[in-house]
Image (cartoon, rainbow, N blue to C red):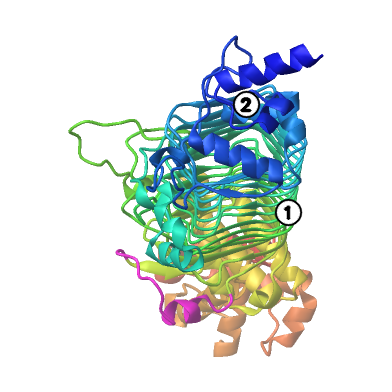
Amino acid sequence: MPVVRSLILACGVLSGFASAALAADTCPLGDGPPYGPAYGAWSRGEQLAWEAIRRGEAINLLEPQPDPRSARTDPGAQQLGPWFLQTLFGVAACERAIGALGVYIIGGDFPLPVYVNGIDTRARLVITGARFKGGLSIAESHFGQSVHLVYGTFGGTLEIKRSRVDGELDLQRNALAALDLYSLDVDRSLDLSRTRPPDAGERAALAALRPWYAGAPVLADPPPAAEPTKLINLHVGQHLHLVDGRFAGIALYGSHIAGDLEGDGAQFTAPAYLPGLEVGGAVRLRSARSELLQLEHANIAGALDLGELAGPRADATRLCLGGARVDDTLRLWQARLDTLDLRGVRVGNSLLVEQVEVAGNVRLDEAEVGHRLALRVSVSERGPRTGEAGPQASCMPSAPRESKPEQTAGPEQNRVSGRGLKAGEVVLQGACWPSVDLTAAAIGGTLDLAGTRWRDGATLDLTNAAVQRFSDEGAAAAAAAGGADCPQAATPGWPARLGLNGFSYAQLGAAAQRDGGDWAAWVGRQAHFSRLPYQQLADRLRAAGRGDAASEVLYAMRVRELDARPPSLGWAWGWVERVLTGFGYRKERAIVPIVVLIVLGTAFAARRWARSALPEPWTLARRCKYSVQALIPMIDTLFPKLSGLLPLPRIDEQQYREIDSGWRVGGPAWCYFHLHRFFGLLLAVALIVSLTGLTA
């Protein structure tokens, strides 16, 4: 045994070990491969770090370290080898010797790529203010406590893959060339906040707190050229923090966050892809900047708050949430968007889009909202800044275009689509609305259009949609109150064109008290004629006790139906009905021509046009009674009560025949009373049709 111990001590001296105590621990620190046949000499920085780690203390390599060989400062005291961390945690003797504080290094310069593979340690790792010129790779490792890599500069990739951290993984305030996290389990939170060089205010605060931080690489070095961040198959036990981070872009695929995702103020110079993300809490991305934010098919158990979104240069961005599920409220406010894609989104509570400017399309097809859907947007006429066509292209990154001007979609391409939408209540407010398609939408409460202003030529398509009620109360007042103005003229409440086939509603509410002509004009905004919208509206007006308004609507229906028919015999009879009976909804029209014909008959029944003697006395009353009987034959038999009400003398059948045969053939009276009887027959039919409502 004494011989073996002497050999070990001799090897320690030859290897450049710092002391006999280190050799006794048999911890082969150096800058060579940890399990290779030879180890290089320790650097001064490694010696200082190891001594502090064994004592359970932090080592500050940013502070000037004296050179033991001279009175000057040792410039190599900050350097650490590429296998330093691997040896600390991967060699059992080294790992056992780590003090209670863990590995706590302030500063440090790693000039070569650093690799940590296959370790399993219970020690904590804290490295702050270090420079990793070649990057850091951690693979297939397990850390039993938290890992903090902060205020560092990574000239190469910071990569952690197929590993687990039982505590928190803190990567905040780093300047990163690239960050790749693959198949990583973090028991607590993952913090990527402020992954950028500190600004002037933060620099001053750091210098005041710790003067030696002025020499930290994250403050002194220029930021590296960044690549998109890749976060693949992550499992985070608490929260993921991206607050105020700066990323070239981000790809967050197949990941599960048990708590919240906090990303307020995050900036992405390239698209941010977060499809299929699962979050057990809320997602907050307020004041974020990105040319494209994609959360398609995400599953969010809490709320989704997207406020003040914009592009990387404060221009418009594209927001894609197709197929996402948000169990609480989805709120989007004060944002500038090229495209808003909410197709197939499922929101358990409310979906609130407030004070949002959209340059392109708003898509809500097949979306489901448990409570309230409020769209308070202004749709610009400039069109989205995309050169790709088709409904899917808006949620994909724009292809590079060389020497081509920016293409914009024309106003006719701007639209709001909510086909198959389901919601408890829908509120549409804002200026410059283009066409809106709510085909087959199902709204359990109110469709509120009170604050909506429409472009000229816009269409609201409610084909086969169903609502409990709709409201445009106060639309004119809201329009007069001001707000964003459309470049073209705009109308409040309802657009100029409607699609109402199959549109069903259970109530009209206070709007039922409007004039019937207003309702007729409203339902007449449908471009293509159909009886169904008129009949639906008339039924609801009758249910509200407005039979007069219902008749006005049905009359307008018959007029429009007649106008749409080509000339024919039926078309001619329709005009007769319209003029004489008002299709049964203007019953007074059947009485007026009868009175006119009776007066004319009375005038033509003059003695001078008779060829034989007329009954004496041939008074005006007898002439009027003859005109009535000629117009309505057998009036005394068919309508005895009506005949009794007329203050006219009675003319029996024999007298009537004598008078009728006494007119000079071919004379004015003879000719007129032939026409008189014809019109009497026609008016009798029209009167019966009018009184019975057969044309309704």
Q: Provide the residue designation for mark 1.
A: 302
Viewer-proximal residue among 267 and 344:
267
Q: Residue at x 34, y 30 (%)?
A: 399
Q: Amino acid at mark 2?
A: Gln
- Pick whichever of labels 1 and 2 is earlier in the sequence: 2
Q: Is residue 182 left or right of residue 636?
A: left
Task: Locate residue 99, reporting x and y percent.
Answer: 74, 43
For the N terminus, which image quadrant?
top right
621, above or below 653, in the image? below
**Residue 566 found in image quarter:** top left
Q: Nearer the viewer, mark 1 or mark 2?
A: 2
Magenta-tinted stretch: 473-488
Secondary element at image label 2: helix
Q: Main secondary structure of the magenta part?
A: loop
Task: Locate residue 91, reporting x and y percent.
Answer: 70, 23
Q: Is residue 86 left or right of residue 390?
A: right
Task: Locate residue 145, reporting x and y percent.
Answer: 75, 42
